[in-house]
Image (tube, coloured by chain):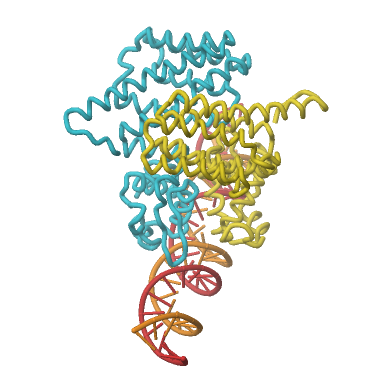
Chain colours: A yellow, B cyan, C red, D orange
Amino acid sequence: MPPSHGHNLTSSIVRDLGIAIVTGEYAPGKPFPVESELCRHYGASRSVLREAVKMLTAKGLLSARPRQGTRVEPEERWNLFDPDVLRWMLERKFSLQLLIQFTQVRITFEPCAAALASHAASPEQRAKITAAIDRMLAAGRGEDDPLESDIAFHVAVLQASGNPFFLQLRELIETALRFSIRRTNAYKGVPLASVLDHKRVADAILAGNAAAAERFMRALIQEALDLMLAEQKKAQKPRRAGGRK
Amino acid sequence: MPPSHGHNLTSSIVRDLGIAIVTGEYAPGKPFPVESELCRHYGASRSVLREAVKMLTAKGLLSARPRQGTRVEPEERWNLFDPDVLRWMLERKFSLQLLIQFTQVRITFEPCAAALASHAASPEQRAKITAAIDRMLAAGRGEDDPLESDIAFHVAVLQASGNPFFLQLRELIETALRFSIRRTNAYKGVPLASVLDHKRVADAILAGNAAAAERFMRALIQEALDLMLAEQKKAQKPRRAGGRK
DNA sequence: TCAAACATTTTATCATATAATTCGCCGCGC
DNA sequence: GCGCGGCGAATTATATGATAAAATGTTTGA
């Protein structure tokens, strides 16, 4: 196993093991390989392997006790808000349902963040929001990257909210956005309408209109959510019902 | 350093270092002790220390590179949604502002979870919500623990929402509730009114009335938030303005 | 039948050695 | 004087082997 992805051996093992866990390669009930076995598997020393296991333990994926071995934790203990964990899940264990569930989180958070931002945004943060909208407009003319400018807008709003918990979602939303376009082939040509939908959120925030900012942001994400729900329904029809996992 | 708290040496060092970091003992800019120094400090071997550092790295508090040493990450990289990190911050670096900010997160999440629950709750989950309300009523009569029953209610709603991200907040909310009562001396005698406020949320969920469930849950948390904001204002008056940190 | 002693397996901890990485210094050439 | 390349040192990264502790299963003794 060459340290192809991360920079060092440990982080690439963390990544590999992490992906193996979230994809269900090691079930929460079934036995996890013992240290020595994993060492052989990866051709790494015990130190490195133990450090990798500790990192996954810190993310809630594993737990270990003497004589009992290392075990995969039940899924509800996983740290879903850890950027690594969410990324692994979206990239490697994609399910439309997971993306929908995360979007439900966004539709919960972001309108609130927009409302807070309309009161709390500093001049610099306001400028950043304006700049992001400008970038989106430019992207509409083909002069900037649509995805990056979109991300920049949402991040700017989160930052302007002044709530550090909201800011935490930054990486998660970035991952989700990057990922969802990679699958849905949206952003073919940025519809101007979408840019204007963003712009009215920005305008409401800059005008200090919390209620409008919240409403418009919610509408924005609801639209994306509706698209996913429609796709989900479409995908269910041809085959059968039963949307578990 | 006896492994007083956690079960083993590593976890107690993780805890100790984690607390030292969130309390600002090691600033994000200033130098962090090198491995050998930390080993001496804790009287532990390098392996143990490195594993502890790796766990903190996984939680976003540290980063390390050869020759450059280990460094504290800027606060916005910390994994605030990690139960350990939030607990350390609330227990050891308490600020009313942080509690308020987290409550803003709750007021964002929980009404939404209640709305989802009103449609998605399974029979078992409904029973759990009912049971929690019964416990709260019992607590009002002094026959059960007010805090535990309150926690049980909120957790039951999160579970019933069917969204794993919401369920993640379980431990966080538990921590925040346990903590906030320890400081505010609320729950002296559970006012029946509060129990009824909870009950009408439960009733709305059980009746499948999403809008009402959302509204009542929001009102419930808003009340707590208002108390904190009032306390914050009260605390600011006597001294001076300037609520940073 | 039950319980205490024992053996075994697995992680936890320790100790030491070597490699890789990066920064700063020094000297060389121009 | 100034840049550039190598050299050395500091620090984490990795490897290895040994010992300790914990938890489980088994055996033995009454």
Residue A197 in the image: state x and y as whole percent.
Answer: 56, 31
Residue A46 in the image: state x and y as whole percent.
Answer: 57, 59
Q: Quadrant of residue B113?
A: top right
Number of numbered callouts drawn: 0
Q: Residue at x 57, y 8 (%)?
A: B207
Camera-side residue of A106 and C18: A106
Is residue A54 at all visible to an observer of this figure? yes
Q: Along the horizontal axis of the image, is B186 left or right of A113?
A: left
Give the vertical position of B134 relative to B11 (above or below): above
Q: Quadrant of residue B145?
A: top left
Quadrant in which the C terminus of chain A is drawn? top right
Q: Quadrant of residue B223?
A: top left
Q: Residue furthest right?
A: A238
Residue A183 in the image: state x and y as whole percent.
Answer: 70, 41
Q: Along the horizontal axis of the image, is A169 left or right of A144?
A: left
Camera-side residue of B114 and D3: D3
Quadrant in which the N terminus of chain A is drawn? bottom right
Camera-side residue of A168 and B9: A168
Residue B31 in the image: state x and y as whole percent.
Answer: 34, 59
Q: Along the horizontal axis of the image, is B172 left or right of B38?
A: right
Q: Residue at x 38, y 62 (%)?
A: B34
Q: Residue at x 56, y 50 (%)?
A: A53
